[in-house]
Amino acid sequence: MLAPGAAIESALGVGELAGYAKESLEAAFPGLWVKGEVSNFKRHSNGHWYFSLKDAVGQLPAVIWARDARRIPAPPDEGMSVFARGTLSLWTGQGKLQFMVDAIEAEGAGLWQKAFDTLKATLDAEGLTAASRKRRLPRYPSHVAVITSGDGAAWRDIQAVIRRRHPGVHLTLIPAVVQGELAPASLVQALDRLARWGGADVAIIGRGGGSREDLWAFNHEAVARAVAACPIPVISAVGHETDFTITDFVADERAATPSVAAERAVQVLEELRAGVRALGGRLSDALEDRVDREGRRLRAHADGLRLRAGRAVERRRARIERVAGRLEALSPLGVLARGFAVARGADGRPLVRRGAFTVGERFDLLLTDGRVTARTEFIDASAPHLRTG
């Protein structure tokens, strides 16, 4: 029996040959990494990426299907040196060799850093990473929400730290997928539930350590915008101390680890009690100082009032004595005391002129210490006190 294509009688159709070639290529190269430079990159409207990988001696057409492109952080730049993993195959419709790529890595940080820097620049320009929009964490939270995996070490660490520091603080887990393709949407949904609930004072979002790919969900744009839009303060706690994600920049505070985030969120109960006692002592001391100051001020004020009142009394006494002296000088009794007498007729009227007297008529003389009844014997117009010289 003749082998397929060995003779005219067993000739292969073009499609059959292309199919055989496709099967042979895919079986011979089931998955391999290829290093090359990206050339003629095109992004199709259906989500597929088409480009060529080339080096100094050859060129290979390549494609990344949309389902695989979604797992790649950013499209490669023209001329970028990359490592591409895929399967060598044949496009039977046109008989063209094709490298079907399912993963791609640029040299160094490459595509991951490009995606990170591009998103951060966008968020910086919108002001979502600005320090001025960061909110202060509540000083005495009563309820802390945690967005993480319920099965992860991060949730256990946060529980242990908060229970040790302040057992009275309520903890609520809002579970979410924290790595893989489903993680971004799951984290956004958890943040949405947190916002609609509104029962927490502060939130922690994060996970424990892992590879760059494991942590990448926290660099997703939708997650970053959801964190920035959260109505309560958010602490981002992703990975270890050296790991930085986009959520760290848009959150109100970044913690190096989930355990540190728990420490930032809740103060130690005994420290709070000590602070209250110290504050009570300071208030008591301040009150005593205020009472002492006010007492001294009132005593000084009273002394001043007494001094001013004494001076006012002395001034009034002196003024009264001066007035009394003048009154005394003008008083009839004062006149009598100086040796004068007042003559008064039988009808009680004072006799102040010579013509008021009648010889032989009785009259009274009022003295300083009594009254004398007298009779007019004669009337002399030449009294000594009337003489003028």
Image (tube, rainbow, N blue to C red):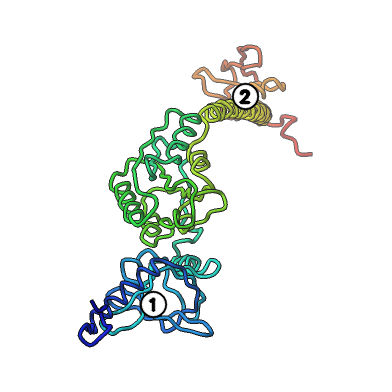
Percent position (x, y) of residue 364?
Answer: 59, 16
* Residue at x 23%, y 84% (from the top left corner): 11
Q: Is residue 206 visible?
A: yes
Q: Are marks 1 and 2 in contact (CB under 8 Å)?
A: no
Marks 1 and 2, how far apart at CA = 140 Å
Percent position (x, y) of residue 243?
Answer: 53, 54
* Residue at x 52%, y 31% (from the top left corner): 268
Q: Hey, what amino acid is under mark 2?
A: Pro
Q: Quadrant of residue 5?
A: bottom left
Q: Quadrant of residue 14?
A: bottom left
Judge by depth and name the residue closer to the eye, 56 or 44.
56
Instruction: Locate the C terminus by quadrant.
Output: top right
Q: Hey, what amino acid is under mark 1?
A: Ala
* Residue at x 63%, y 11% (from the top left corner): 370
Judge by depth and name the residue closer to the eye, 351 or 167.
167
In the image, residue 72 above or below residue 217? below
The circle on residue 62 is 1
Q: Which residue is mark 2?
A: 332
Q: Mark 1 or mark 2: name the one nearer the start of the chain.
A: 1
Q: Is residue 354 visible?
A: no
- Total numbered circles: 2
Judge by depth and name the residue closer to the eye, 211 or 343.
211
Q: Tag 2, which secondary structure?
A: helix
Instruction: Please identify the residue farthest to the bottom as the structure is shown.
Output: 8
